[in-house]
Image (cartoon, helix red, strand yellow):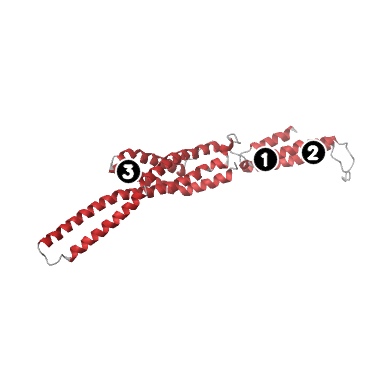
Amino acid sequence: GSWLRGLTARAAAAHEPESRHNMLLLTCFAVHLEPRLATRAHAAPLFDPLGLEQVQPTAQAHHQLVPAGGAMVAALAAARPEAALAKGGEYGIFEGRIVSLAHPAVMAMMYAATAWAAFTGYQWRQLREIGNQITELKDRKKKHESQLKVLADGEAEAAPPALTAELASLTSQIDELTTTRKELASSDLRAKHYQVGSVILGLGTAFAIEGPVNTFLRAQKLFPGPHLYAGAGVVVCWAMAASLVPLMSKGKDAARTAHIAFNVLALGLFTWQLPTGWDITLKVIKFTKFP
């Protein structure tokens, strides 16, 4: 009857798990009891003090059992909200597991790309510094060669062994650095570093924003905490590092140093995010469904 439908509605609307459980038990008891009450209300009174007479359910009681069973099914469905999407499917696939896992999947690739960018950036800086090292060694070599020439012009019996050994060492270092510079120059490090940096700035920033947006679509709120704050810091570091590129192209050493500092900070924050990001990913898998 109407009282049973009202009881079912209260069970579905209960927010606390304990309250919902109690209401569901009461609803199931009422579903079991209502057909019997209806049957006895319509049955003729009998003198049966020992209860030997079995009263068969009437047709009306049978018809009342169907909506009562439907009410019980609805109440049980209300007890499993985790099986449904947070917004009840209002946003469709954008609330599903595939889109929800896009953020952690892309950000994992961005972490690998950030590490690769750090490696290529370090090699590119090494290539720039090797030229200065070679120039310095060549200057020292010229001074030693001048000393040997002076000694030879003075008809010295033999060059000092220490001077000869140092000259040989300088020549070996110059040859080794020259070989390393050729290898690094053939790797086209500048283009690789620029390309991976562009991917991080574009794709990484886009999916760093997609993550909170997807969370809001599913839960209708954000969850401020270390992961969210660190992620915002990473994006800011990416933007600041990219903004220094024009000054770096003009040879500003201070801009290069700041560029490296921002990227090291971004990589550190990114690494610190990994444990909290993994925990959030497990929760997304638990509380979402395909697609």
Along the horizontal axis of the image, is 286 left or right of 68?
Answer: left
Q: Amino acid at mark 3?
A: Ala
Residue with the mark numbered 1:
77
- Nearer to us in this view, 7 or 163: 163
Q: From the viewer's perspective, is the residue at label 3 or at label 2 nearer?
A: 3
Element class at badge 2: helix
For marks 3 and 2, give the CA distance. Answer: 79 Å
As shown in the figure, which amino acid type bears the numbered disc 1? Ala
Q: Looking at the rendering, in which quadrant would you find the C terminus?
A: top right
**Location of the N terminus (image quadrant):** top right
Q: Is residue 140 above or below residue 156?
A: above
Q: Are marks 1 and 2 in contact (CB under 8 Å)?
A: no
141, above or below 11, in the image? below
Q: Nearer the viewer, residue 61 or 232?
A: 232
Q: CA distance from mark 1 to mark 3?
A: 57 Å
Residue 165 position, x and y percent, is 21, 64
Residue 268 appears in view: no
* Residue named by callout 2: 35
The type of residue carrying mark 2 is Pro
Residue reaching furthest to the bottom: 157
Name which residue lies at 32% across and 48% down.
125
Looking at marks 3 and 2 on the same chain, the residue that comes earlier in the sequence is marked by: 2
In the foreground, 217 or 193: 193
